[in-house]
Image: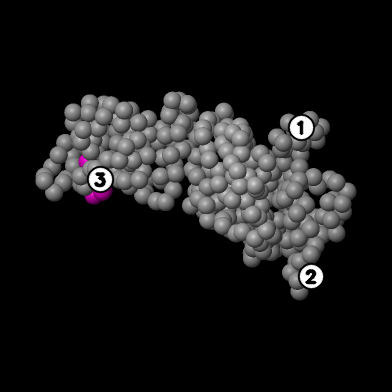
Amino acid sequence: MDTAMPVVVTGGLTDPAVLEVVLGVAAVGQAGRVGDIDAVLLRGLSPQAMARLTHYGLALGLLVEADVLVMTAGGVIHAKGWLDVSPVDLQAREVALAVMGLQDKLPVEQIRARLGEIRVAVASRVRAANATLRGLRVGAGEVVEDAKRVLHAGFFSVEESRLRFRRFDGRMSEPVRREVFVSGDAVTVLPYDPVRDRVLVVEQMRMGPYGRGDPLPWQLEVIAGRIDPGETPEDCARREALEEAGLTLGALEKVAEFYSSPGAMTEYLYSYVALCDLPDGAAGVFGLAAEVEDIRGHLVAFDALMALVAGGEVSNAPLILTALWLQRERGRLRG
């Protein structure tokens, strides 16, 4: 792109914090408008800044216009524009950091294909930043990251960090290399009918057991799914119940929030029991065709559920944890 002509940006790029992340330097622009949209006009960008802007624009699939009319206080100016229709929000800078961190590491086409996963991971980090509960834990909370690289980027990603952390004796640790499986926050929900005293569990083929060599990788599980950007955990629980079981949920009872495997995974779960009407015939086969989901529901009496847990046929943590919570709270819910 010829930098002799001014550049105009719109949408999320009008946020100075986002723009600094993208360009790599703080930029002072001129306020303007493109049609009825707020814009920022930029002059004299260096080749390095333009290369970074081009990477970001291509990765996000922004519309590029060669000649845009920008209304400014000084009149109409012709500019070349990266037109971003995304809103300015609290997560825009985090998305920009993630996208720019992949420059020269992944092709822009691959980054663009992973934007949904990137936004899910960013939303998870924003929720994590608000979790400040401290009681028994005495860790200093100081971690210094010296380097990070992406080892794999697909539906999930694997990242390697070189870091040091504050030890319990007050000294900093030696540099260590750690790898983490990155996935977004997710929800699990077990529909429970307190009148009929039964639950609905779902069954589907799972890659974890398959990868371990389990000859029967189909699992009995709670309904589960990743939380979409802008979605609350409760909204996600209701959406997933419709998608995976065709159910409309009633009141949601919080079971717990927890990391599923904190030694290796970023996944953080919000688990619920949902009061629900589960008549005969409520179980069926559901799932999104676009995601090649094949999910079968099973209506199971509460006593039968606990027998499945005790007998080992239920072999995943969310359903075991939720079943034990329901065993404790069942009398209250039925009352």
For label 1, the crowd category at 10 Å Cα-Cα, with few meaning under 14, some 14 to 19 and many 20 or more, is: few
Q: Tell me the CA gap for discs 2 and 3.
A: 59 Å
Q: Nearer the viewer, mark 2 or mark 3?
A: 3
Q: Which mark is residue 331?
A: 2
Indicate the position of residue 164 as horizontal and vertical percent values. Answer: 57, 38
Q: Tell me the CA gap for discs 1 and 3.
A: 52 Å
Q: Which one is earlier in the sequence, the residue at label 2 or at label 3?
A: 3
For label 2, the crowd category at 10 Å Cα-Cα, with few meaning under 14, some 14 to 19 and many 20 or more, is: few
Name the residue tied to disc 3: 39
Q: Which mark is residue 212?
A: 1
Tag 1: amino acid: Arg
Indicate the position of residue 182 as horizontal and vertical percent values. Answer: 59, 39
Image quadrant assignment for residue 273? bottom right
Magenta span of residues: 36-41
For label 3, the crowd category at 10 Å Cα-Cα, with few meaning under 14, some 14 to 19 and many 20 or more, is: many
Image quadrant assignment for residue 11? top left
Task: Identify the residue at image location x=20%, y=36%.
Answer: 43
